Amino acid sequence: MKKNAVVNQRMPKKQKQQRIKHLLFGSNVKTGIITQLFIYSLLIGIGFVYLYPMIHMGSYSFMTLEDLLNPLITWLPSQFYLENYETAYRVLNFSSTLGVTLYVTVLPALAQTLVASLIGYGFARFDLPFKRTLFGLVLATFVIPPQVLMIPRYVFFNDLGIIGNIQSFLLPAAFGQGLNSAIFILIFYQFFRMLPKSLEEAAYLDGAGYYKIFIRIAVPMAIPAFIISFLFSFVWYWNETTMAATFFGNALTTLPLELQRFNASYEQMNAQNLGGSNVNINEGISMAGTMLSILPLLVVYFITQRWFVEGVDRSGITGE
Amino acid sequence: MKVSLKTGKQLIGMSFILPWLLGFAVFTAYPLGYSMFLSFQQVRITPKGIVTDFVGFDNFSYAFTVDALFTQELLTYLEELFISVPIILVFSLIIGLLLNQNIKFRGLFRTIFFLPVIITSGPVIEELMAQGVTAIPSIEEYAIFTIILNNSESFFNSTIIYLMDNLIFILWFSGVQILIFLAALQKIDRQIYEAAKIDGASSWECFWKVTLPSLSPIIIINVIYTVVTYSIFALNPVVNHIQSNMFQINTGFGYASALSWIYFGVIALVLLIIVGLLTLRAKKKYS
């Protein structure tokens, strides 16, 4: 108490106010408590609104019909109810659809990544004729809407007989014209440019050829870029439905496409299954279906999320 | 000797980008040309193959005169684009600035704000919209909005309704942009801020005089990214319209090609105008 009085005495009133103000609102050196509180509450609030559809999806997918109709139950289901998932699993034909989806996303993503690394390396390390023009064209392909290319590609693929075949995704990807290929070429270009040249030069003096240098030195150093490109490409191919619906027709079906027909498939299944209980589709079932269709992506994301975040840093579009 | 060495190296370099050159010719340049050709044709699919008749600009004029749905959808698309893009940009900048503060759990927040990028596909959004969860929860219950909606002209009205119904969905488009802003913010030299603070600038002034000018190239990149991803998203009505015309007997590939070129032209024009305005502004202000 006495000590406080001394401090009070020593400190003019104005300075004391200043000090409290700094503590609460922050100063040039430190952020204050109120400012911090404000930032956190803003982030948490926006984060909640952001996640609201996901939370809704998760909670509804576990609700029984009674829970859905009960106005008192909004968030927490009254019991742990898995039947929605069982139904949705059968409607989506989950395991086999998942297999097909992985097949038509992993392969093009791999092809796209490998080819983008070659092209990116070529632009980063070699002095090519018309290099600026060509690189400009690479970036320009990003702006071309896929709808313009879809019809001629459809006619072309139809002539080649690869409609309804994975080739219609794989071929453009393997030639650097896949989904958002320009971004991946840019990522590899930036990545290789940032690597020191000295190792490659030393290898060259030791008599290694350029292809060998690329495979033995550049590729191992660019592993992060490979992971980033593969993951982004995987996710984008997975979520692509316009092209998939047009090029695959009814021959191949992915989880997002099955989700699109979810209601129709459900009714069809119900009609065939005459003896069973004839329940109309409800929100719980369709939310469980949506949840199932994004579940593999969520698993991938939670294992690899740091690569996604770093990917944007490493792409170098923010300027180095 | 030196020359041949150089051309040798160039040849090897060319071999690295050869896949792209071939792919560009076969899968991009040729389809672009063919699509342009088709847009001036009436295309019929016969058992013998595709038959085309030259019709001049008929497809284009049909789009603007007869096909009322297309013009209407195009206008709605433009209107929504001009509402959504600024919102996405400002929102992602704010989140970027917040995350750039010295806060705990930054990784967790980044993970949350990037999550929609992973799961956003047309059908998922459709399912969520059907549930009504992309609207701000129970906003209609607030009296003030009812008053605003009852007492205003129609454009403003429709804008507000669009925003209320789709806000979360619009915000979901900003995952990548937030990370781009955050990465750029972290690369701004701390010393500039320190110097400005010593000269007595407040945080508010620092934002307008230091942060924003250094971000201007990034803003342009984000605008382009936002416009492109927003325009090609599977739920876009114009995209759906083009797709549905592809397999219609009376319109077909020719008309759909013409539509896609009009759409491409509109997107390119929008990009040109926005990027042009932004670069002009940046040059005027900060040079």
Image (tube, coloured by chain):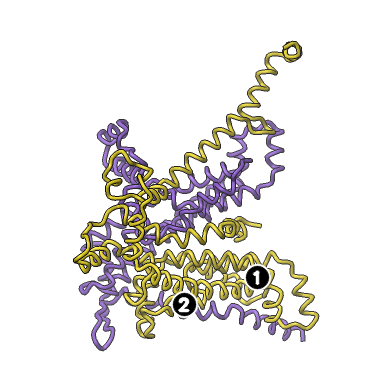
Tag 2's secondary structure?
helix
| Chain at numbered mark 2 | A
As measured in the structure, the alpha-carbon distance from the residue carrying label 1 to the one carrying label 2 is 25 Å
Amino acid type, residue under disc 2 in the picture: Leu
Q: Nearer the viewer, residue A119 or B71?
A: A119
Q: Nearer the viewer, residue B285 or B152?
A: B152
Height in image: B1 above or below A11?
below
Chain (purple) = B
Amino acid type, residue under disc 1 in the picture: Ala
Which of the 4 image quadrants contains residue A278? bottom left
Could you tell me residue B165's position as x and y percent?
33, 45
- Which residue is under mark 2? A170
Q: Quadrant of the N terminus of chain A?
A: top right
Kindly identify the residue that appears in the image at 47 percent across and 69 percent down. A179
Could you tell me residue B29's position as x and y percent?
45, 76
Q: Nearer the viewer, residue B137 or A262?
A: A262
- Which residue is under mark 1? A124
Kindly identify the residue that appears in the image at 71 percent across and 38 percent down. B194
Left or right: residue A70 versus residue A195 is left
Q: Residues within 10 Å of mark 1 (few under 14, many from 20)?
A: many
Query: Which is in the foreground here, disc 1 or disc 2?
Result: 2
- The color chain A is rendered in: yellow
Height in image: A252 above or below A291?
below
Could you tell me residue B151's position as x and y percent?
26, 33
Kindly identify the residue that appears in the image at 42 percent across and 60 percent down. A294
Q: Nearer the viewer, residue B235 or B123?
A: B123
| Chain at numbered mark 1 | A
Residue extending furthest bottom? B48
Are labels 1 and 2 assigned to the same chain?
yes
Height in image: A235 above or below A149?
above
Residue B36 visible: no
